[in-house]
Amino acid sequence: MAEPGRNRADALSVAQWKEKIERALACPQAVGPIRNIKDEDPRPFDAIFIGGGAAGRFGSAYLRAMGGRQLVIDCWPFLGGACPHSACVPHHVFSDCAAELMLARSFSGELWFPDLREKLTSIKEVVDLFRKGRTGPHAVMNYQSREQLDIEFLLNAPARILDRHTVEAGGEIFRARHLVLTLGAEAAPLEAPGSELVGVHNYATLVETLDREPGATVVVIGGGKTAVEYGCFFNATGRRVIMLVRNRPLDMIPDRETRAYALERMLQQGIEIIEGADVVEIVGDSARRVARVVAATPDGPIEIETDFVFHALGERPRSRMAVEALGVEIDAKGAVIVDEALQTSAPGVFAAGDLIGSPMEMFKARKSGAYAARAVMGEKVSYRPRDWPDFLHTHYEVSWLGLGEEDAREKFKNVVVMKLPPDNPDGLNIGLPASDRTMLYAMARPHMSGFQKLILDGDSRRVLGAHHVGYGAKDGFQYLNALVRGGLTIDQLAEMDELFLNPTYFIQLARLRAGQPNLTNLA
Amino acid sequence: MAEPGRNRADALSVAQWKEKIERALACPQAVGPIRNIKDEDPRPFDAIFIGGGAAGRFGSAYLRAMGGRQLVIDCWPFLGGACPHSACVPHHVFSDCAAELMLARSFSGELWFPDLREKLTSIKEVVDLFRKGRTGPHAVMNYQSREQLDIEFLLNAPARILDRHTVEAGGEIFRARHLVLTLGAEAAPLEAPGSELVGVHNYATLVETLDREPGATVVVIGGGKTAVEYGCFFNATGRRVIMLVRNRPLDMIPDRETRAYALERMLQQGIEIIEGADVVEIVGDSARRVARVVAATPDGPIEIETDFVFHALGERPRSRMAVEALGVEIDAKGAVIVDEALQTSAPGVFAAGDLIGSPMEMFKARKSGAYAARAVMGEKVSYRPRDWPDFLHTHYEVSWLGLGEEDAREKFKNVVVMKLPPDNPDGLNIGLPASDRTMLYAMARPHMSGFQKLILDGDSRRVLGAHHVGYGAKDGFQYLNALVRGGLTIDQLAEMDELFLNPTYFIQLARLRAGQPNLTNLA
């Protein structure tokens, strides 16, 4: 069937959108509000989404698909929010570079790989490449939102909430039956003297303001996903990377052995991690640039000379405007409190996305936006994220779902484990697993070719958890997770058709054991 | 639970197996039969698997897991068969190199990438790297088979079938209740004068006998998966590649647009394809090396000067020994005919794997081996491959499942299509899709960043087909296929939790439309 609203006469092409977005980013005032509102439509808005990130855009699309009328407002000249501008997309660019650079360094001077030993590669060139390219995805999202999804929007225009039904933006007043707050989150600040110095960055300022090539030593503050992901990229460029971590890095990986594999590969690449570290001060030079970092550690105070500090200390919901304008209740972390119908404490006002707190993941932003749209349209909905798969990047892709082995053993009596490499006298230094993007490692650097583990309940024969370090598995974890939620057993897994050499060997490992009436480990 | 047979006193480590396999490959006689047979076990063998490739090894493991006793015999000194020695594993090594080299050439001289313009990189070094590394996976499979799976085997010993219960190998006679023929297949020969010249290779001889660096022009004969996969690798090394294809290359990709995207990227990388071409003769020089290829084409005869010819014309089941010894019936292509219980025409003799014909895919080899084991153990089984997902490599990974758009439209009245990039005035030259391994393309070479398509029945809302060109999706297609078999709808897809930036955007595309009572395209 044809798409509604497709190919109208005044359509902008993706290239035209890109040009317009670039002009607006360079000087918002020169372009002014970017308005796609059907003034001829006599219907009132069912909802105004305040914030055009994942939650606002997917909520808008869903509401529109249901036949309702919405408006989405954003201060940026594009829909999609921080993700394509400073978060998920640049993160994936950097992680891709980290993977490529680790490969190039591992085979430095062999095959076609350049000799990168002792050489720094540019961080700034990658940042510049991203900054130049990012308006491409922005433009696609505007094109898709307008021409394919028929979304009404007002962009390049900050919104001001006047009351529970009324918003001002771009010099106009808009009213709706409901507001949906989708204002997102932003990097939590580094609370230390000197955090304002030039050369101190978070993920957002890195791509906006990096003005020169960082030197040979980088200090990363934090141990969560973002800190690890950026730290691995900086390391892969050949720099000394010192991570100052308050607790433990990679702590979110639920399986101990999987975490250890990922962590050991980071250390092997030369990343230095100091646990229990607190930043005392960042000291600048006379030009107000970073000169060194002073930290307290369990072994006493340390000073690190550096001109480049990256901190990633979590995300803070952007709830202030909503609190001030509507008095919505927030929790201790600043997240807007909602019930399972995405209702805030302000009657008729909904909220979705990162603004409502963790998990601040894309699936939750989009799904909660869509659920809020359904609630707006009168559906009785209940949304609470549960049992989601997860991932992060080191130089590798690390994916997981369900329980780690330790938790599984606490909850189940008859836990069966299948893993690769198995426990064996040569440890990790063996040539399997191997799959796309790890083949050269498997053949010539086997300890680098990945780790994977499947955890089962031997009584019910059900999959309890799956864990993977390598590449090319995170997409599969989405679908595998849906199957596991549905009660996937080893016998069903053994019946599937693998696409060999598959990154996750779970199907074939399952098939090697499925014939057993009483399952035993393959580990 | 502990593994049966694990950690016996006489266990060989993976490293020890590697060394032993290397000695046996260098000189089989010096090592002699590699025997892991429990002479103390008083039970007769339930089955002897003749051939230790995927079918024989997985069949053995399954039978053992069920509590039966088996023996598997192979002429190679390792279990696993051709896959790790000359087929799937080297293929993945070469395809990984093709992907890496395309990236390096696309960004030649930018970022950290070496300037590869006008430069050839070595084919032989990659072959040598593989040949040196492949005994690693071999060793793991022997280790796993013996120490973890408790399989009895006789390796480095060709088997001779004496009758329906009896086999001679390594100077011993073995008897079993049943034989399971798992002899595999081998590359079909090139039927043209000159096919025996030095420099004419198939996938098996390439990794065994390549003795010098190929020159600047490569002729590839064939248009199937293997021809395309190796052709793309040779092309990525900087060589001129001319593919002589009898019919159409990439003909197995069911969706026309997906095939076109994959094919156009190959052409853009400079691969030359001559359709309707028949090789007339390969002409050698005085040293009996290839000098040129003569072919008949729709535009008349051509001659191509080259010192390197690669042909991939399909696989031929290795059925001769079984026909001669047991009189088993074969089909016109030489495949051993079996019923759905994997029974051959010889009573009590089973067959599995590539020997029984297409699809000659890993999942079928392994599953049919396991089903044969179940039949041997008295279970009433029925196995016939159906609705499997599939993939190939160009410089990309191309994955598919279910119906292409054209077939879907023939079978369903209300077909709904979701794809990325959508039809738009800028065509493919837009910055989405983007995911792991395509990020640099998405930012700076957007026409190279992939293509994907989901096909739905608008009436039942079910997924009919999925198609992907990019990276990191083939693992997901395994699990997605299981969901599609189970009747996956757009609404269920929209409820899943994506791991963004996921290679397959199907979950989020579904969520953008799932609110519609009457689905429309997002294309």
Image (tube, coloured by chain):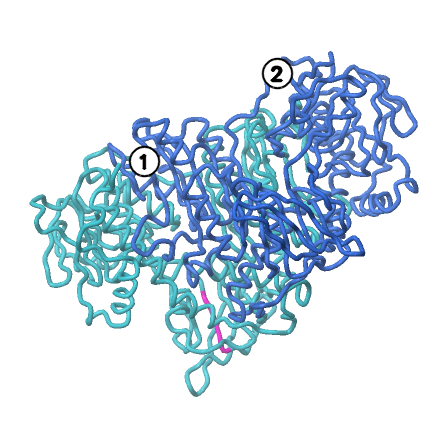
Chain colours: A blue, B cyan
Name the residue that disc number 2 marks.
A381
- Find residue B140 and report its horizontal and vertical position in percent: 32, 55
Residue B506 falls inside the magenta stretch? no
Question: Horizontal and vertical percent for residue A168?
Answer: 87, 24
Q: Quick one: quadrant of the C terminus of chain A?
A: top left
The residue indicated by pointer 1 is A416
The residue lying furthest to the bottom in this view is B286
Percent coordinates x, y for residue B443 in the rendering: 70, 52
CA neighbours of label 1 inside 10 A, class few (<14), some (14 to 19), many (20+): many
> Chain letter of disc 2?
A
The residue lying toward the viewer, choosing from A271 and B120, is A271
Camera-side residue: A12 or B354?
A12
> Can residue B257 be seen by looking at this rendering?
no
Identify the mark at residue B157; answer none if there is no mark. none
Which stretch is magenta? B307-311
Q: Residue at x 58, y 68 (%)?
A: A118
Q: Is residue B500 left or right of residue A79?
A: left
Q: Residue at x 21, y 47 (%)?
A: B150
| Three-letter code, disc 2 | Val
Residue B485 position in % (x across, y down): 46, 32
Camera sees residue A130: yes
